[in-house]
Image: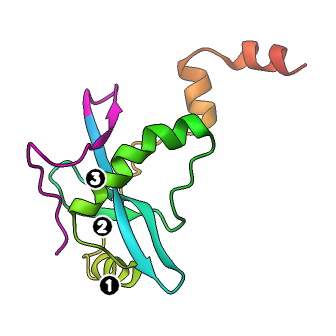
């Protein structure tokens, strides 16, 4: 199983932060991949505990020279880790147990939300 091992000398991790929960949602990092066309860098996504979530199917392609300059260090540090293949990660992801479906019993209809927020009159006036 591919797990992210965070060591002090290891490459930079990127973090997605949720203001609502007050914590990180996931981590991602640059990784070298090898496929039929050659080598490339892709982003690999991990849970906060280091377990694999998935990866970006398309290679990382900076959209500006400034972004390329910022990415180069992460790309270079990706060489310190094993080279991956899409097939390897696809097999691992396919082996994950299915995630439980979220409980949607708490969902409200648009009418319920509008009533709760007392927006019925405001919304119809705004639309006209």
Read off the residue under disc 1: 91
Q: Mark 2 points at which residue?
A: 99
Residue 48, position in %: x, y?
A: 20, 48
Q: What type of secondary structure mainly makes up the magenta span?
A: loop
Pick the quarter of the image with the C terminus: top right
Are dots 3 and 2 in contact, CB under 8 Å? no
Query: Which residue appears at 11% of the width and 45% of the height?
Result: 9
Give the quadrant of residue 13.
top left
* Separation (CA) of disc 2 from disc 1: 16 Å
Q: Distance between the residues labelled 3 and 2?
A: 32 Å
Whichever of callouts 3 and 2 sits on the residue coming sooner in the sequence is: 3
Establish if 3 lies above or below 14: below
**Circle 3 sits in a helix, a strand or a loop, which is it?**
helix
Residue identifier under label 3: 77
Picture quarter with the N terminus:
bottom left
Q: What stretch is highlighted in magenta?
A: 1-23
Asked which secondary structure carries label 2, the reply is: loop
Left or right of residue 12: residue 6: left
């Amino acid at each position: 199983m591919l797990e992210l091992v965070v060591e002090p000398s290891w490459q930079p991790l990127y973090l997605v932060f949720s203001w609502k929960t007050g914590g990180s949602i996931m981590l991602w990092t640059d990784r070298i991949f090898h496929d039929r066309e050659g080598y490339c860098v892709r982003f690999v996504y991990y849970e906060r505990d280091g377990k694999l979530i998935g990866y970006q199917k398309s290679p990382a392609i900076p959209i500006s020279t400034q972004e390329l300059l910022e990415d180069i260090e992460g790309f270079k540090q990706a060489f310190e880790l094993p080279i991956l293949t899409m097939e390897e990660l696809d097999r691992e992801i396919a082996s994950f147990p299915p995630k439980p479906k979220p409980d949607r019993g708490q969902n409200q209809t648009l009418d319920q939300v509008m009533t709760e927020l007392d927006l019925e009159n405001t919304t119809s006036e705004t639309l006209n």
